[in-house]
Amino acid sequence: MTTTPPSPLRLTTVDTEDTVRIELHGDLDHDNADHLLHAVTDKLAGHPRLGDLHLHCAGLDVIDSMGLSILLMIHRRTSAAGVRLHLDDRTAKLDRLLTLTGTLDHLTAPLTGQRELPPRQHGRTPDD
C-alpha cells in the first residue's frame, strides 16, 4: 500500500483596501488548516475597511473535517466583523463535502441583513 505525502497549503493573497482575495493551493487538512485561519485572522485585523473576503478554492486538493471546521470558524469571524465571505471556484469535492455536511448554504448564502452592515471602520463595529 502506498500513501501520498500531504500537500502543503500554499496561499496567494491579493489585497485592496476593501477586498482580500486568497487563493488556496494544496490540502486544507489537519496538518495545515490553521495556516489559513491565521492568514484570515491577520487580514481581518489589518484591513479595518474590509468588506469582502474571497477564498478561491480551485487549487484545493484535499479538505478534511479540520479544514471544514476552519472554514466554519472563518465564516464566524468574518460575519462578526461585517465582512462578506465568498468561497469562489469551489471544486466538486468541496461542494460534495459541504452538501453532505449541510454546510453549503450556511457558508455560501449571504447573511440576512448583511448588505446593510457597513464595513468595519478603524477596527470598530457599529455596536462600539
Image (spheres, grey):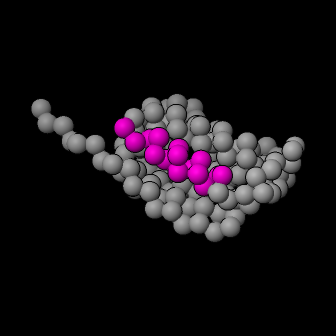
| Residue 41 within the segment the image draws in magenta | yes
- Where residue 33 sits in the image (x, y, percent)? 44, 41
Q: Is 69 located above or below residue 42 in the figure?
A: above
Q: Is 52 located above or below residue 97 in the figure?
A: below
Identify which residue is drawn at 71% across, 52% down: 83
User: Dividing the image into 4 quarters, which one contains the N terminus?
Assistant: top left
Q: Residue furthest right?
A: 127
Identify which residue is drawn at 44% across, 50% down: 91
- Where residue 8 sits in the image (x, y, percent)? 33, 48
Identify which residue is drawn at 59% across, 66% down: 15
- Looking at the image, residue 24 sits to the left or right of residue 54; the answer is left
Identify which residue is drawn at 79% across, 43% down: 112
- Looking at the image, residue 98 sits to the left or right of residue 110; the answer is left
Can residue 51 be seen in the rendering of this structure? no
Residue 48 quadrant: bottom right
* 92 or 25: nearer the viewer: 25
* 12 or 105: nearer the viewer: 12
Can residue 103 be seen in the rendering of this structure? yes
Q: Residue furthest left?
A: 1
Predominant SS of the magenta segment: helix
- Where residue 108 sits in the image (x, y, percent)? 62, 46
Q: Which region shows up in magenta?
A: 31-45
